[in-house]
Image (cartoon, grey):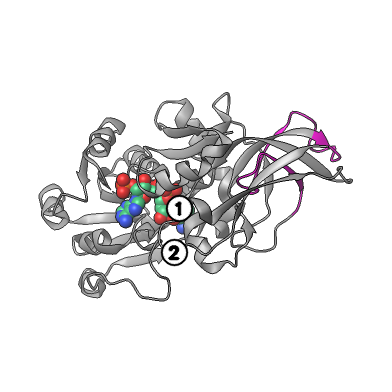
């Protein structure tokens, strides 16, 4: 009999998630049925959407999220013992899963796929640069921003999992890249990653900064955070600029029944004839593997760095999660179980 542990979300979060919004539950796993596999978790992910979707779900629920597990026992010949797989089973140390085809498109989704061919890279990358955040950076940026060589790209949340990749992909595509992040250390780090310009959004006047480094306007804005930063960038776009809205983390801890208040953006959109488009990665599952193949190639040939912020220990997942929401991570926040 295998003893398993999992985090259960027991409350609707009020503001930032609190430690006692989660309960760690221990339970006995039943024997495997035909078609099932038993996974031991090796790596798991903490992401902003785990905060955001709490507002739409009814607790209690098991904390979902991407994780990499290794098959310990199997009753599915497609997944022999020792196979590494990615599932959306979240914050648990052992779990029984089946190879299912998910019908719904919103978290919590049931999903399982074999670890992509990482060509010797750490399996943890399947949660970041070669996982959901990598697919988001690659597909959303290229499909919506449609960057051209020589154009100017601005990225908010630039030092995080998605943003740090978008900035580097923009450099691969020959663009000038401007990043916004929340500390001076992150600004320095972004320049080391290859960003042409970087600013601490907490201390800089974004309008003034952009007028200086992008005098002809920003052609592509990759928006991870929403709010006032984004309003400021959208008033400094070039004619026909493209805005890809991927995240709105500045509002995730707010009361979802109240509309957040920021500077009106419509004049900026109207007079520069901007294209503004939202993107949800769950709608593009059929293209993840295509993105992964390119991302692995770029990492292996040295064009793309895939930095990670690793926390160790099953008992420290909450700290990793709240740390990521508070901006402690440089690159992708992951937990080694
Ligand atoms: N649409 C999709 O399909 C999709 C897929 C993946 C991710 N996303 C979204 O993309 C965004 C980035 O996700 P990620 O996984 O790459 O997370 P991340 O950037 O690695 O981590 C979150 C970062 O957000 C920043 N942040 C926190 N509060 C903020 C605020 N009030 N204003 C500005 N920045 C704030 C922090 O960095 P600082 O120190 O810089 O503040 C923190 O490090 C999130 O909004 C997420 O929901 C969307």
Question: On the rendered structure, is 273 left or right of 13?
Answer: left
User: In which image quadrant can residue 179 be found?
Assistant: top left
Mark 2 beta carbon near ligand 1 (under 8 Å): no
Q: Residue at x 20, y 41 (%)?
A: 197
**Depicted 204 relative to depicted 70: above or below:** below
**Depicted 129 relative to depicted 266: above or below:** above
Q: Is mark 2 on a helix, strand or loop?
A: loop
Residue sitting farthest toward the right: 34
Tag on residue 14? 2
Mark 1 beta carbon near ligand 1 (under 8 Å): yes
Q: Mark 1 or mark 2: which is in front?
A: 2
The percent position of residue 67, horizontal first and vertical second, equals: 61, 42
Q: Mark 1 points at which residue?
A: 48
**Depicted 290 relative to depicted 211: above or below:** above
Region in magenta: 73-100
User: In which image quadrant can residue 166 be found?
Assistant: top left
Please report whichever mark, 1 or 2, sits nearer to the chain's N-terminal start: 2
Work out which quarter of the rendered image holds the N terminus and state it: top right
The percent position of residue 207, horizontal first and vertical second, equals: 14, 57
In this view of the protein, which residue sits in the foreground, 321 or 234? 321
Q: Magenta includes 76?
A: yes
Q: Magenta includes 91?
A: yes
User: In which image quadrant can residue 167 be found?
Assistant: top left
Q: What element carries label 1?
A: helix
Q: Which residue is drawn at 22% across and 55% down?
A: 218
The percent position of residue 142, horizontal first and vertical second, equals: 42, 51
Main secondary-structure element of the magenta-colored stretch = loop
Q: Which residue is drawn at 45% across and 26% down?
A: 301
Question: On the rendered structure, is 67 left or right of 149?
Answer: right
Question: On the rendered structure, is 253 left or right of 181?
Answer: right
């Amino acid at each position: 009999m295998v003893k398993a542990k999992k985090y259960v979300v027991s409350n609707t979060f009020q503001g930032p998630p609190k430690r006692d919004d989660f309960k760690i539950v221990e339970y006995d796993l039943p024997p495997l049925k035909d078609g099932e596999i038993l996974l031991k978790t090796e790596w798991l992910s903490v992401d902003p959407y785990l905060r955001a979707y709490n507002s739409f779900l009814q607790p209690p629920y098991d904390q979902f999220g991407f994780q990499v597990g290794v098959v310990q026992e199997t009753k599915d010949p497609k997944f022999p013992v020792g196979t590494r797989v990615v599932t959306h089973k979240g914050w648990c140390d052992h779990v029984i899963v089946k190879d299912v085809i998910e019908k719904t498109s919103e978290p919590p989704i049931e999903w399982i796929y074999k670890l992509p061919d990482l060509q010797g890279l750490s399996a943890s990358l399947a949660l970041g640069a070669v996982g959901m955040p990598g697919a988001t950076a690659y597909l959303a940026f290229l499909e919506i921003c449609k960057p051209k060589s020589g154009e100017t790209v601005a990225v908010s949340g630039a030092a995080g999992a998605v943003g740090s990749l978008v900035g580097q992909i923009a450099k691969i595509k020959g663009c000038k890249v401007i990043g916004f992040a929340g500390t001076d250390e992150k600004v320095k780090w972004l320049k080391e990653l290859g960003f042409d310009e970087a600013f601490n959004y907490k201390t800089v006047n974004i309008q003034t900064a952009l007028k200086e480094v992008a005098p002809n306007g920003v052609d592509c804005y990759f928006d991870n955070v929403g709010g006032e930063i984004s309003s400021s960038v959208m008033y400094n776009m070039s004619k026909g600029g493209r805005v890809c809205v991927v995240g709105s983390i500045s509002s995730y801890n707010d009361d979802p029944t109240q509309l957040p208040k920021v500077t009106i953006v419509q004049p900026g959109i109207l007079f520069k004839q901007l294209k503004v488009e939202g993107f949800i990665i769950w709608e593009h599952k059929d293209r993840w593997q295509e993105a992964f193949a390119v991302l692995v190639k770029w990492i292996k040939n040295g064009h793309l760095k895939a930095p990670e912020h690793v926390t160790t220990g099953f008992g420290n997942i909450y700290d990793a999660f709240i740390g990521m929401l508070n901006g402690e991570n440089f690159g992708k926040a992951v937990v080694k179980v």
